[in-house]
Image (tube, rainbow, N blue to C red):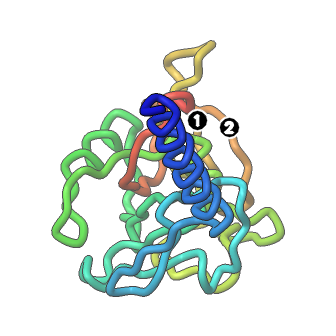
Amino acid sequence: MQKQMRNRGIVGGLLSLSLLVGAALMAGPAQAATGNGPYYAEPAWAQKLPVATRFIELTDWSSAAVLDRETGLVWEKAPQVTAETWFSARGTCANKTIGNRKGWRLPSVHELASVIDPSQSNPALPLGHPFINVLSTGYWSATSNAETPTFAWNVGVGNGNVGTFFKTSFYQVWCVRGAMNADAY
């Protein structure tokens, strides 16, 4: 008898847990709020958001950074306008302080291409984007060319083209902050 009651208690507990998990999954993505409004706690690269809600200028970062709600990455709002070699660009991002925060890096080629809007040009960024000082030229990514290690991938922000160039060439630097996707390197 006691064993039957214990089994009913376990079954009832599992049923309750299942209902809670199911309700949480049906509720959709979790939202959190910042001083800048709500954002999705777990961005999904597959989602396509309108520009007005995709990019959020982070006022609590001295308005020097922009959260991309589609990818969860934080971009510097105003990339530097001086060109550098790939080697120098990596150090520039690693040593940067933006919005009183460290931890910046060069984006992967996929991350950099994620801000491109192929329907636009000069720059090929979504209409209404919050970025300033973005030049219509090539920007370094952290991604080396696997077949030719002396080359690295570059994204042309003027037209959205992606290509590889000698790492000793001079191109623009646009730093990003967020978890690195190891598969993209």
Residue under pointer 1 = 153
Q: CB under 8 Å between callouts 2 and 1?
A: yes
The quarter holding residue 117 reads bottom right
Vertically, is 64 above or below 36? above
Q: Residue at x 24, y 45 (%)?
A: 94
Measured Cα–Cα span from mark 2 to mark 1: 6 Å
Q: Which residue type carries mark 1? A: Trp
Disc 1 crowd, CA 10 A, few/some/many (<14, 14-19, 20+): many
Q: Name the residue type under label 2.
A: Gly
Q: Which mark is residue 163?
A: 2
Q: Residue at x 20, y 56 (%)?
A: 102
Left or right of residue 48, residue 88 in this image: left
Indicate left or right for 46 with 182 as reference: right
Could you tell me which secondary element the residue under label 2 belongs to?
strand
Provide the secondary structure element on which disc 1 rests: strand
Instruction: Point out residue 173 in the picture as x, y percentages from the top left corner.
Output: 42, 53
Is 33 located above or below residue 143 in the figure?
below
Q: Using a 10 Å C-alpha cutoff, classify the residue at mark 2 as few (fewer than 14 neighbours), some (14 to 19) or many (20 or more).
A: some
Q: Residue furthest front?
A: 1
Residue 161 spot, x, y in % from top left: 73, 49
Label annotation for residue 30 = none
Q: Quadrant of residue 176?
A: bottom left
Q: Residue at x 54, y 48 (%)?
A: 12
User: Most extreme residue toward the top, as rendered?
Assistant: 147
Q: Find residue 154 and report its image quarter.
A: top right
Tell me where residue 105 appears, x and y as whole percent: 34, 46
Pick the front one: 156 or 66: 66
Left or right of residue 17, residue 84 in this image: left
Give the percent coordinates (x, y) of residue 83: 41, 53
The numbered mark, 2 or 1, whose residue comes first in the sequence reads 1
| Residue at 69% over, 43% down | 162
Identify the residue at the far right of this view: 119
